[in-house]
Structures are given as C-alpha cells and as structure tokens.
Amino acid sequence: MSTAKEIRTILAAYPADLRVSEAEFLAGAGGFSGARFWRLKTGSRLLCLRRWPVDCSADKLRFIHEVLRHVAREGVSVVPVPIETTSRETIVRGGGHLWELAPWLSGTADYHERPSAARLGAAMRTLAEFHHAAESFPGGSAALRTSPGVISRMDLLTAWQAGDVERLRRAVSSSSVSGLATVARDIIELFQPRAADLYDDLRAAASLRVRLQPCIRDIWDQHVLFEGDRVAGIVDFGAMRIDSVATDIQRLLGSMAGNVRDAWERGIKAYSATHELADDERRLIATLDRSTLLLSGMNWLRWLFLENRQFDDFAAVITRLRTIRNRLAGV
C-alpha cells in the first residue's frame, strides 16, 4: 500500500483548490486487475484515485483517457473522465506506477441482487450509447475487418491444444486447496471435448467482416453501476482497445443474462434500437460468447496454477470460477 506521503505527492500535481479532507483506501475495490484505489473527499466532491499496475504503459493509458474524454464530449455522462493536472496531463508518475484521478461515480453494482428486464435493457442501451459515441474516435476502421478478438482466441486455443492443458492438469492435481481444485478439474473436463469444435467456429468467424472501434472488452455486471433501474456509471476501462462491438455485447450479456436465451434476445434488441448491428456483428456475438465462456475459465486457471498470481479476494475468485463452471455445464 502506498504511503500517505506518496499520495500527497501525487495530488500535488493537481490544482491547489483540490484539498482532500478524507482518503479511504479500497485495495482492489473488488476487481482483479492489480490496480489500487482510494476514495477521496474534497469539499462536496468525491474523487477516485487509481494506481495502475506496473505493466500498464503510458501509451495505453493515454489511449483510454482520450477515448473517455471523446465519448464524454459526445454526450456520454456515465464514464469517469480523468481530471487534468496543472500541466494539463491526465497521468501522474510516482513510485514506479502511473496514477489517475477521476470523479467518483455514484451507484451500486448490484444487478444480480436486483435483476430485471428494465435494468438489463438500460445496461444494453447505455453500452450502445457508448459505442455510438466512440465510433467517431480517430483510430477506428472504416473498412470492415476481422475482429482482433477472434484471432487472439484462436492463438489461445492453439496454445492449450499444444500441451498447456496437460501442464495445467498436473498442477491442479498437486493442489492442496480442495475447493479450488474441484472447480478447476470441472472446468478442464468441460473444456477439452469442446476445444476442437470451438477452433472451427473461430476459424469461420475470422471470415466475418465487422467495424472496428474502441471497445471496453471487460464490461460485465460488476462494472455497471445502477441507481434504481437507471445506469449511473460504467467503471474499469483497463482492457480497452480497438475491436468489434460484438466483443462488448457478448461480455455484458454473458454476465447478466447467463444462458437465458430470451434475455439475450431482449438485450440485443435494446442495444440495436440505439446502435444498429450488421448481420456479421450479430453472427459474431454467439461465437465470441462460446469462446469467452470456454477460454475465460482456462485463463483463470493458468493465472492461478501456472503463473501463481495472487488476488486480494480469493473467495471472489472462487465465485467467479464457479459461475463459469455452472454456465459451461448448462450450455
């Protein structure tokens, strides 16, 4: 955890009228990226101070910030637009990390505590509004191309089929954490018989030609903040890059609708009323959902068993893995 002195040094880069009266350390704030967060009170405002992981580059963070500023100028009010320093920057360097300061967004990520058709529709319309605003950001592609997400998934599958599954199986068999080992074995057994068919699906999806633009790529129910049935905010844009909007649609609906096909249809209808989808984009959604479902569990197991990554909230990790396992078993 950074010291109070280091935080004061970071905040010194901002205008002098930004006087912080309270600072609450939130650790990872329920996320898994390795970022650290503080909720700051300054006068009547609440702000969010974020320390990015050491592997986050300045170029990547500038891209994220520029997209957020662009969509805000286009009328999207639910994103945390970074605050500028006195030198008109949105990034501060300190302690080997990059830092940012942004408004604290109101609302609660409680979709699964209070699910409803109204909330699902609101989330999908908000995502469509974000995509509509981001479509004009410089750097997208007017030409129709293959989704980069399809290619990266094919690469991941190739690695697993080349022997990584057996390495993982051996690592899981030597685990002493019984609850984790059980769900890990289930995910591996559900993955293996479907991997070859998934590769064929992805190869076919590589022929689909879609628009490319800034996409969030890690948009799921825990990153959508609600006030009643209204979306009050979207948080965590650390995975943002250029891809197809189908990537975001399937991630958000996969987390909110699960395997309920009627909910998927309602969600896509709500989205397309604001941001029209082409036929190839609609076709891509289903393949991306199947590949995300199969590969996300395996990626979590790679991080845990092969890379020995550590996470703040191990219970939340187990819950995430069980959710993936249960969706896989129900497909």
Image (cartoon, rainbow, N blue to C red):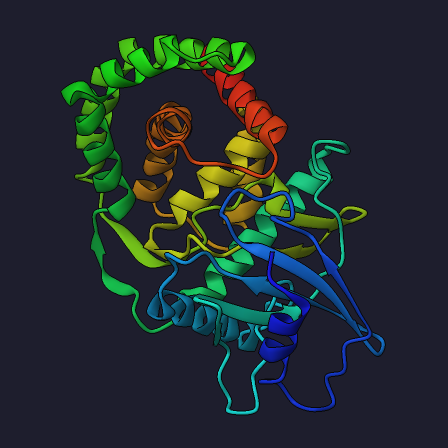
User: Among all residues in the image, which is located at the extreme left?
Assistant: 162
Tell me residue 70's x, y (percent).
48, 74
Total tally of numbered discs in the picture: 0
Identify the residue at image location x=24%, y=40%.
Answer: 152
Tell me residue 60's x, y (percent).
36, 65
- Along the viewing direction, whichever of 227 and 144 lies nearer the viewer: 227
Identify the residue at image location x=43%, y=66%.
Answer: 96
- Along the viewing direction, whichever of 183 and 202 lies nearer the viewer: 183
Left or right of residue 58: residue 46 = right
Placement of the C terminus among the 4 image quadrants:
top left
User: Above or below — where is 266 with respect to 61?
Assistant: above
Say which quarter of the image contains residue 303. Answer: top left
Tell me residue 68's x, y (percent).
51, 69
- Along the viewing direction, whichever of 117 and 112 lies nearer the viewer: 112
Left or right of residue 43: residue 18 = left
Identify the residue at image location x=38%, y=36%.
Answer: 285
Say which quarter of the image contains residue 48. Answer: bottom right
User: Above or below — where is 146 with respect to 2?
Assistant: above
User: Among all residues in the image, which is located at the extreme right?
Assistant: 44
Instruction: Answer yes or no: is residue 71 visible.
Output: yes
Instruction: Answer yes or no: is residue 265 visible.
Output: no
Tell me residue 313's x, y (percent).
61, 35
Say which quarter of the image contains residue 309. Answer: top left
Left or right of residue 193: residue 61 = right
User: Above or below — where is 162 with respect to 169?
Assistant: below
Identify the residue at image location x=35%, y=34%.
Answer: 288
Placement of the N terminus among the 4 image quadrants:
bottom right
User: Above or below — where is 214 with respect to 73?
Assistant: above
